[in-house]
Image (spheres, helix red, strand yellow):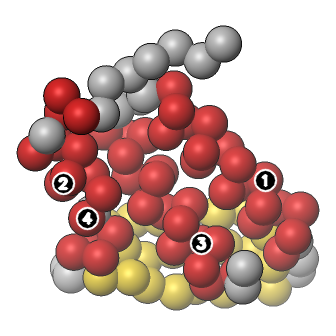
Amino acid sequence: MNVHDTIYNWLTIKVVTDARPEDEAATETEEMFLQMLKNDHGINEIQYEKADLFYHVSYRDNEDSKSTKYPIELIEVMLKQILAEPEKYKNFPTI
């Protein structure tokens, strides 16, 4: 998976975990993508902000500062689906 796909996946689930901090499965998935960013792509800092029509992501790739952006509607698809049908996305404790 390339770095932009990994950031996209991380950001999509990060938005879910920010909205649902009790969601253990989402938290584990976010941590998995964060580890992929660190281990596979050398990203040691990553942050995002929501502004205008985009999520703006900034990160450090080894020693270089980089940034990218993703449309809000693309990133929030999963969160909107979960919020629209919460009965399908119950939080089950991990074993």
Asked whether disc 1 touches disc 4, contact meaning CB atoms under 8 Å apart, the reply is no
Q: Which comes before the other along the chain, label 2 or label 3?
A: 3
> In the image, residue 36 lies at what x, y percent?
78, 61
Q: Which comes before the other along the chain, label 1 or label 4?
A: 1
Query: Which is nearer the eye, 45 or 1?
Result: 1
> In the image, residue 17 lies at what x, y percent?
43, 40
Q: Element type at marker 1?
A: helix
Instruction: Give the CA distance from mark 1 to mark 4.
Output: 23 Å
Disc 1 marks which residue?
35
Disc 2 marks which residue?
80
Q: Element type at marker 3?
A: helix
Disc 3 marks which residue?
7
User: Is 82 above or below relative to 10?
Assistant: above
Q: Residues within 10 Å of mark 4 (few under 14, many from 20)?
A: few
Instruction: Give the CA distance from mark 2 to mark 3.
Output: 19 Å
Q: Residues within 10 Å of mark 1 (few under 14, many from 20)?
A: some
Q: Element type at marker 4?
A: helix
Q: In the drawing, does residue 94 fall left or right of residue 20?
A: right
Q: In the drawing, does residue 59 fall left or right of residue 11?
A: right
